[in-house]
Image (spheres, grey):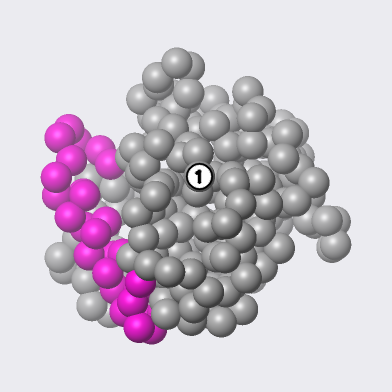
Amino acid sequence: MNISVYPTPLETARELIVHIIEQLNKKNGPFFNIAFSGGNGPLLMFKLWLEEYKNQTPWEKMCVYWVDERCVPADSSESNYGMMHSLLLNHVPVPNGQIFPIQGENEPVAEALRYSELVRKGVSLANDLPVFDLVLLGAGTDGHTSSIFPGQEYLLTSSQVYAPSEHPVSRQKRIALTGQPIIHAKETIFLITGEEKTAVVADIFHSSQNGPAAYIAHYAKNASLYLDSDAAASINH
């Protein structure tokens, strides 16, 4: 597990953007397959990317997938695709044919199957699993990641690529990238910032079983954590 700690959320997001651009430029072959998450961390990152790094990014190489999605229409304020589209994708030259949203308005079981097959066709397979070049994750204060919540640990070892899930409090339906494609990605990166994430970061470091995010961080083949100083306050680094 690689750990990088920066003073502020802005600096953390900036360093992650620079890293992604470096990986895009290093990629052998035409396409770099990346799965993005939603949440506050990416929100800041998308804004910064557009403001400071738009002209430095080889957008034509990027194939954009999503880690998870709420089962809402694309124009909903809760849509992960909708957020990224309005903040970034609508303003940069990623070809439309290289943007693959989860269709949150569809029936969840059918959409999880449809999207799984779409990913299998677009992303290289190894041992029957799609291998993303990069999977970008966050972590909730409850230890969830990729809409895999505590109590849904079966999704960490599921044979499905994407599967329906449900928020344990609101009961909102979600579609989530399951654990095995996440841990077998070429890079699995967590972006975690803020004082409210101090406890979950501590859990990630001190237990491989205390929540889905901790499991992923410990078992991913190539895991990195980009943290700000507040989120990292309880760990030695």
Q: Residue at x 45, y 58 (%)?
A: 190
Part of the protein shown in magenta: 5-32
Q: Quadrant of residue 198?
A: bottom right
Q: Secondary structure at mark 1?
A: helix
Q: Is residue 38 left or right of residue 21?
A: right
Check disc 1 and give the amino acid type.
His
- Count of numbered circles in the view: 1
Q: Quadrant of residue 70?
A: bottom right
Residue underneath mark 1: 218
206 w.r.t. 65: above or below = below
**Residue 24 can be seen in this image:** yes
Estimate the x, y position of residue 171 in percent, counting from the top left.
85, 56
**Residue 88 can be seen in this image:** no
141 w.r.t. 187: above or below = below
Q: Is residue 56 left or right of residue 100?
A: left
Estimate the x, y position of residue 10 in percent, counting from the top left.
36, 81
Q: Nearer the viewer, residue 161 or 57?
A: 161
Q: Is residue 20 magenta?
A: yes
Estimate the x, y position of residue 134 in percent, counting from the top left.
36, 45
Q: Quadrant of residue 124?
A: top left
Q: Is residue 175 magenta?
A: no
Q: Main secondary structure of the magenta part?
A: helix
Q: Nearer the viewer, residue 158 or 28?
A: 158
Q: Residue at x 76, y 43 (%)?
A: 152
Estimate the x, y position of residue 50 in percent, counting from the top left.
30, 73
112 w.r.t. 12: above or below = above
Q: Residue at x 42, y 80 (%)?
A: 229
Q: Quadrant of the C terminus?
A: bottom left
